[in-house]
Image (cartoon, rainbow, N blue to C red):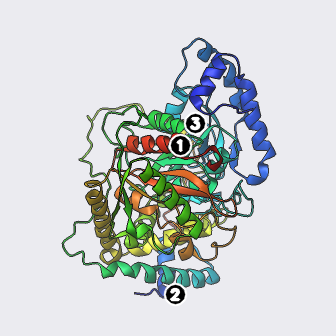
Amino acid sequence: MADYSSIQEKILNIRSGEIKLKENILYFLNQIERNKDLNAFNFVFADCLDQSEMIENKIREGKNGKLAGAVIAVKDVIAVKDKPLTCSSEILSKYTSIYNATVVEKLIQEDAIIIGKTNCDEFAMGSSNENSAFGRVLNPVNKEFVPGGSSGGSAVAVAANLCDAALGSDTGGSIRQPASFCGIFGLKPTYGKVSRYGLTAFASSFDSIGAFSKCTSDLALITEVISGHDIKDSTSANIVNQLFDLSFSNKLKIGLPKEYFSDDIDKDVMETIQAKIQELKANGFEIIEISLPHTEYAIAAYYILTTAEASANLARFDGVRYTRRAKEFHDLEEMYSRTRSEGFGDEVKRRIMLGTYVLSSGYYDAYYKKAQKVRRLIQNDFMNAFAEVDLILTPTSPFTAFKLGEKSSNPLQMYLSDIYTTSANLAGIPGMNIPVGKDSSGLPIGLQALANQFEEERILQFSNYLEQNILKRTEL
Amino acid sequence: MSVSREEVKKIAKLAKLDLAEDKIEEYTLQLNQILEYVEKLNELDTENVEPLSHPVENINVFREDIIEESVSREDALKNAPSRTEEFFKVPKIIKSDQ
């Protein structure tokens, strides 16, 4: 049924009458129902069917927006007006958004159709989508494995063909890692390129909204639409929003950081990525080894800084403004602590505890300030590297999807699975997952492409080149 | 540096979380594992490094001080667990015996 290869092609097919938008949306609603066991969605908006006629008419008349008729799922940490916004947490289980996030507003302006809110790790904290008040999400490639996290539901919704594309958020890899585990495309833009207005804050200086898709051109289109300066987000970058040109004229100079190609990588992941690198060389790319010397400190700095920011951001959930309040308490103090203890899950509490500790008096300099200094060193590593190369390639994850429950009892083990993705958020640079193959058990392998701040276009051009020239259809 | 059970209790109080005894036990263990891991940052000499608080170092963002339309009172109160016509309602703060 979804027999088109891109959103642009879908629009053309709707215009020619080959695709009926209503049937197309019904197909996806059906798919969601049939794949309920994957648990990708927290909420499905069946009433989105009502828009099909209006948008189809616009397409026929040629008055449509860039994403007309594109069926898009939104991670349940992003606000859609008058719809639930739970962050997959008990504490927000009854909350209804009172406005649209800027990204949602932009999608709607371009005639996209929002089909529902996707499951994720609670408050986007996790790497496996096993920490959710709505239950864990399963990997559609093999249901015994995790889909990755925290935007697991969004990745699964795209990979299992439950929608055309999806929005996620990436604080330390939460778009790129699930995209890698599920075998799809996912782009975390430069920090500040996409407005965070309407995104529930986890770690404000790290959070980026981005998209998941089945092809590079859809990802370019959606990223283009959701980007741009927003006065409602004071950290949003005040630069002119560019339109992406995916055509590729000059061959890029690519760096492979030696710290990312260590013995810790799964054999299949290493071999697949090396094979692609050889093909790139054969196609005339200049590829050199580079060094990002502070790589091994990224996870430590990341978990200190993000938990500190999270402990401050999540202080707002106090039983006063956001629906949930404990039933029994003796005084105000107890109302706060009971509400929070009943409402937050284990991982969220653990991170609030760690964040509170590293910010507490006597430890601030030793942990928080130290980590901020290391953040500078990591950013400097990338600035030095990008003075020499246009693009950096690494595996997105050292391994393919792991089994459900495999890492859930050991938080540190889980944190270490973000080893290749957190650096981009520390440095604020864009990063993308490109699906490049499968391991011996059929699980997807992802290649991560990183570029300097605001150079998304380079990454997208490269991905498009790879998709058109090197990747075989069977690898995607 | 390691963190004791008593410290974990103190942090929980600061973070406004009630933790059961077994959770305090578990978090003490896990926080110590994590803190032990992050110790590795001390291998680096950062004496002359400026802390980086934001990945894109913005200048201050200002706007004219004029009143603009914002969220309506009704919308703002919509998700309140307890409210009056105009306010969020919280339990009594000043106790009668004080």
**Tag in front: 1 or 3:** 1
> Would residue A137 appear left or right of A204 to someone viewing this image?
right
Numbered mark located on residue A81 in the image: 3
- Residue A430: image location, x then y, percent: 40, 50
First of labels 1, 3 by sequence position? 3
Numbered mark located on residue A210 in the image: none
Vertical order, A330 against A11 (above or below): below
> Would residue A159 appear left or right of A387 to someone viewing this image?
right
Q: Which residue is drawn at 79% across and 38% down?
A: A30
Residue B54 in view of the camera: yes
Q: How far apart are marks 2 and 1 (CA)?
A: 53 Å
Label 1 is placed on what type of residue?
Glu
Residue A362 in view of the camera: no
Q: In which quarter of the image is the N terminus of chain A?
A: top right
Q: Residue at x 33, y 66 (%)?
A: A292
- Residue A313: image location, x then y, percent: 45, 58
Q: Mark 1 vs mark 3: tell me if same chain.
A: yes
Q: Which chain's residue wears label 1?
A: A
Counting labels gives 3
The secondary structure type at the circle numbered 3 is: loop
Label 2 is placed on what type of residue?
Arg
Q: Which chain's residue wears label 3?
A: A
Query: What residue sits right under mark 2 in the picture?
Result: B5
Q: Which chain's residue wears label 2?
A: B
Foreground of the two, B61 or A206: A206
Query: What residue sits right under mark 1 in the picture?
Result: A467
- Residue A269: image location, x then y, percent: 56, 64
Foreground of the two, A69 or A439: A439
Q: Residue furthest front?
A: A282
The secondary structure type at the circle numbered 2 is: helix
Q: How far apart are marks 2 and 3 (CA)?
A: 44 Å
* Res A426 → quadrant: bottom left
